[in-house]
């Protein structure tokens, strides 16, 4: 039977399968869940792009922070006095408050209530809650489960450890022609939540796969697979000299749901990554928004801080805290689709391509218009958009004064960036154009 | 009986009473009316803020101008030949053309008409007219009075003097931590007109009373109680070296009527006083307008002139020439209200507070986000807006790069200035922030 | 009988008559048609403004181009085998493809068809087609004519020559007080097309006549009567040292039709010519548009090229390729009117006047407002707009800080440029203002 809808390519299916493989693991900002996650990611990367894993010991001073104790959990439940487990980590790893201290005691219903988290407005969903820097214990459960807890007393057990250990993060680099780099981050600290942020992990992993198969790009590209906030802080603390080489940065988060794309600009705003993302999203022709920076969200907060001042945006579909399924058990495998992951990867690829291609050129025959016919420029034109390419050529020649980059040309002319880029390539081949060296 | 409306505080009543006390006096740009007015203002100021009165002799060269002769008036009337006074200065001091030369003669009805000013569209109102720089005599009267003047001849007498004397103005300063100052002007030259500008006098006088009771502010603040135009010119002529210290200026005019607030920007526009006033008015949440500069109006004209180039705005309710009662006897005690004066004073106080508080800070832990929890920042939060204050803290930390002031932070974040200011104070206390020194 | 409509002045009629005189001539980018055209233009110019004609030999290298062979044509037709001329250059000089190579042969209907150009959507119009840089032959004809060509064979003859010769252009200069100049271009290469561009020729010619009768202006003004593209390139190639003196430039094209005015900005945008044209068009109060630059159109392309970077706009009514009559026989004498030519000339004159008048001044009494009364400024005011002129005077004094030009004052105040200019003149006379020297 014929379908109007194009089937997503195999990589879309592979991204989804990677999410499915990672979904059951209980992750946090430290611990074995993170290690296992990174190990799986590493297996999905091509051999020429090894994943480099770093372990940072608990207690290490990192910028203004200290690496916390490592957290691991084996199980946890609320049990009736008659031994019936009414809430059990074995059923869903959101059930235990993330970073929960161990507990093993009998407790009154009343006191237990102060350790419970549920969502009255979504009575079937389990919320996701954490307590990284204040030692607490607790359970997250659906409102329906909570309503059944009517016994006067219960037994609570959480078999977790909070001990000196390590924080684990990883990075993978695609070498470019320059040490200057594009840095992408994706957080790996959330347990069984798909959109936030197994989707980001899947897109970043497959972006690396795509880049491995391509010629060496202009910029190096680095992906950080890190626990949110503290992970970036750890990386920054031991890579301060690299920061000057990060020319463009972006966090990749919540990229599998049905929401239209949102790009959140860097703190500085109007930087090249912001202009590229606005253009790349705009050229999709579908609903989207480009929003101003705000100082909460994901790892863009660390990179945009005034000391580092890296132009660092954030690409997402559903926004931080703005979709009902956010940080609940409803952010599961059915909340994300192959198609959405595919479109997200396509957009990121396109943006990376634009960053690599966006140069400032000088017209080498700047006095009057060069005679294109005798230089074979018209013969070099092909495809269906000859008139548009010709127009693009005129725009590139007119604006290539060493001050405007190709993105400027695309923005002013209203022509697609790819057309402008191709026009510049033809002109470079016919020696009418030369890239400005900084 | 209960009222929904909050009663204005005592100072509102006091402002109104000050206007009532000043209303009967016949003022002009020189003369005893101005002296008496300044004497009353001085009595309303606290002893620690003395009013310093300056007398400038007629004939003194001041910038491009010359101080005119001093004008004083004792009486004036139009009388029928049978001795009936049909228009009398004793009834309303607007009846005689301000700065009128003396006259004492019998005159034909026809010739008299060339000396009369009335308002056909407002037949019960007496207009306010002046002739400072061309020696004339005349009477202002209601159209109804004018229509009764049907005799063939009348007697006119104006018992005024135009003689060498002085121009009188006064100033009052609140010392701040710096010699740099905020300058406010309010004109004192209009006779019995309440909104224009006893209202400005009342607000300025009570602003000084409020400031006297407060700790020493960052900026010094000076109020000039001056005749319009020539008064500013006199002050500028003998205070040229002070002008460099005037960092922000504003004229206070027409602040008692029911019109919404209008702020007229400085000539340069976009200066700190303009940004503060736009923000302060905007945060009131009530209808208002911020309008571009234009080169007529009040004393802002002299301070914004290209030689001085002081950023000098103007705050008003009813605008210069835009309300029907403007420069007529209808601008009387019933045209202004305590509530309006109170709101005006509140706005000016708030704006002065914002100017004093608006500093540029540097984040002292600029690499990544500082860990606020360990620094007791969260403990310092109080009140009802904890979430907003926390957000304000993040914004201040992100934008405190030594280039953006708190007003920038307030504008970009959309958070009230006071919240941003308080967030900065908490961060300064916890040594995460330091004010930029110029 | 009375008419509501003002009759156009004699110069409007003269412009129209000049077009009528030039219309029958077959022009191209080279050849005797161009020479004859320039000769007629020269006869319409006053003796003190001689037209200087330049001949550039075929084969001369000019910038990136080479001057082509000279083209001349004596006749051309399509004939039936029985000797009936069905399409004949003698009837309309658009009938032969401009720059057509000679031909003289018998040809099948089928092959002939590949050499024919017609407009199915406008079956009565003859299109205008050229082939300057690829040697071809062809005929342009109406669709109705084409439809009658049903014989199996025809005879085609074009009696043209493509031989080494010259390209001809001309220029005319009005000397100003400065070597700096305003440059206007108008293309002379189109055969019997009225709007494009006999209208531009007529307006430019009469602008020169008007300027000849006026006092020596600030800027010199030069008009180039040139074949499009290659003409500018020839002029630029031999006048490279003059380019630095071109302060403002504009091409004059399609100025006789009924379309509202369109001004196309320079590539740089926001340059003085752009601001002047926006203001001059805006002050007409009629529909108009100001559009962004684009790198196709007329001679602005050569002057705006990044090597020369002359701020060069384009003034037109109907836009390049946007009106149906464009490049067809319908662009004839009934497509243009005296009234439209007159309004176009008026606008160009006004814009030139604004460029000459737009200076930056310094207020010589910048401290406070000068006392205008004692300086006789008010006595200098006349006409009906005293209040507006007075306001204009205040604006000029306020903004004359050596950084803002009169156009800035006009734009910000919203007052007509002429009023601002006159106010500045009064202030200059009374020594309150001095023009800034660069």
Image: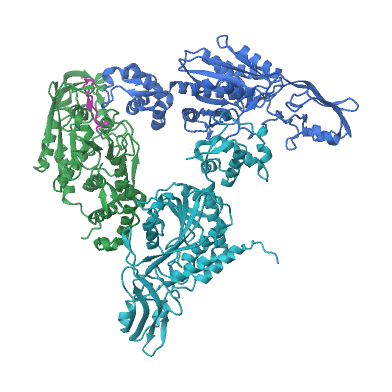
Chain colours: A green, B blue, C cyan
Does residue B288 lie above or below B422 as drawn?
Answer: below
Does residue C242 lie above or below B260 as drawn?
Answer: below
- Tell me where residue A35 appears, x and y as whole percent: 12, 32
The N terminus of chain C sits in image quarter: bottom right
From where the camera sits, is residue B90 visible? no
Q: Which quadrant of the view contains residue A394?
A: bottom left
Q: Is residue B360 left or right of residue C375?
A: left
From where the camera sits, is residue C111 visible? yes
How would you classify the magenta stretch by its main secondary structure?
loop
Q: Which residues are magenta?
A: A126-144
- Tell me where residue A120 appears, x and y as whole percent: 31, 31
Residue at the far top in the pictured view:
B47
Would you say residue A139 sits in the magenta stretch?
A: yes
Q: Is residue B160 left or right of residue A258?
A: right
Q: Nearer the viewer, residue C427 or B350?
A: C427
Which residue is found at the position 30% from the left and 21% from the top? B364
- Tell me where residue A118 appears, x and y as whole percent: 27, 29
- Tell me where residue A376 appears, x and y as whole percent: 25, 62
Number of marks drawn: 0
Would you say residue A205 sits in the magenta stretch?
A: no
Q: Which quadrant of the view contains residue A143?
A: top left
Does residue A306 lie above or below A385 as drawn?
Answer: above
Does residue C287 lie above or below C111 as drawn?
Answer: above
Which residue is found at the position 31% from the left and 72% from the top? C135
Residue at the far right in the pictured view:
B82
Which residue is found at the position 49% from the left and 23% from the top? B244
Q: Nearer the viewer, residue A358 or B352?
A: A358
Q: Nearer the viewer, residue C236 or A349?
A: C236
């Amino acid at each position: 039977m014929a379908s109007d809808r194009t089937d997503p390519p195999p990589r879309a299916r592979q991204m989804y399968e990677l999410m499915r493989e990672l979904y059951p693991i209980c992750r946090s900002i430290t611990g074995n869940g993170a290690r296992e996650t990174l190990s799986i990611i590493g297996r999905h990367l091509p051999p020429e792009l090894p994943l480099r894993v770093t372990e940072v010991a608990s207690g290490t001073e990192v910028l203004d922070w200290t690496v916390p104790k490592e957290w691991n959990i084996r199980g946890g439940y609320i049990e009736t006095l008659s031994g019936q487990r009414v809430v059990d980590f074995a059923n869903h790893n959101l059930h235990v408050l993330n970073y929960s201290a161990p507990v093993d005691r009998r407790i009154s219903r009343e006191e237990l209530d102060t350790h419970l988290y549920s969502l009255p407005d979504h009575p079937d969903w389990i919320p996701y809650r954490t307590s990284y820097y204040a030692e607490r214990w607790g359970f997250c459960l659906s409102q329906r489960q909570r309503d059944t807890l009517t016994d006067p007393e219960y037994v609570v057990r959480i078999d977790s450890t909070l001990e000196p250990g390590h924080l684990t993060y990883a990075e993978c680099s695609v070498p470019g022609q320059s040490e200057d780099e594009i840095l992408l981050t994706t957080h790996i600290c959330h347990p069984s939540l798909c959109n936030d942020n197994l989707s980001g992990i899947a897109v970043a992993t497959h972006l690396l796969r795509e880049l491995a198969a391509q010629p060496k790009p202009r910029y190096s590209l680095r992906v950080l697979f890190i626990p949110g906030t503290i992970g970036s802080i750890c990386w920054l603390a031991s890579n301060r000299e690299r920061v000057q080489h990060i020319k463009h940065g972006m966090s990749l988060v919540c990229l599998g749901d049905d929401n239209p794309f949102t790009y959140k600009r860097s703190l500085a705003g109007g930087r090249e990554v912001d202009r590229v993302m606005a253009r790349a999203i705009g050229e999709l022709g579908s609903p989207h928004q480009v929003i101003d920076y705000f100082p909460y969200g994901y790892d863009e907060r660390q990179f945009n801080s005034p000391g580092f001042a890296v132009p660092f945006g954030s690409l997402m579909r559903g926004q931080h805290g703005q979709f009902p399924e956010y940080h609940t058990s409803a952010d599961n495998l059915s909340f994300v689709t192959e198609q959405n992951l595919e479109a997200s990867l396509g957009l990121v690829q396109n943006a990376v391509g634009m960053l690599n291609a966006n140069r400032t050129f000088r017209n080498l025959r700047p006095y009057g218009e060069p005679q294109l016919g005798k230089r074979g420029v018209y013969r070099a034109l092909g495809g269906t958009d000859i008139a548009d390419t010709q127009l693009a050529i005129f725009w590139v020649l007119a604006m290539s004064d060493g001050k405007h980059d190709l993105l400027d040309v695309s923005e002013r002319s209203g022509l697609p960036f790819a057309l402008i880029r191709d026009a510049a390539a033809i002109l470079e081949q016919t020696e009418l154009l030369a890239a400005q060296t900084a």
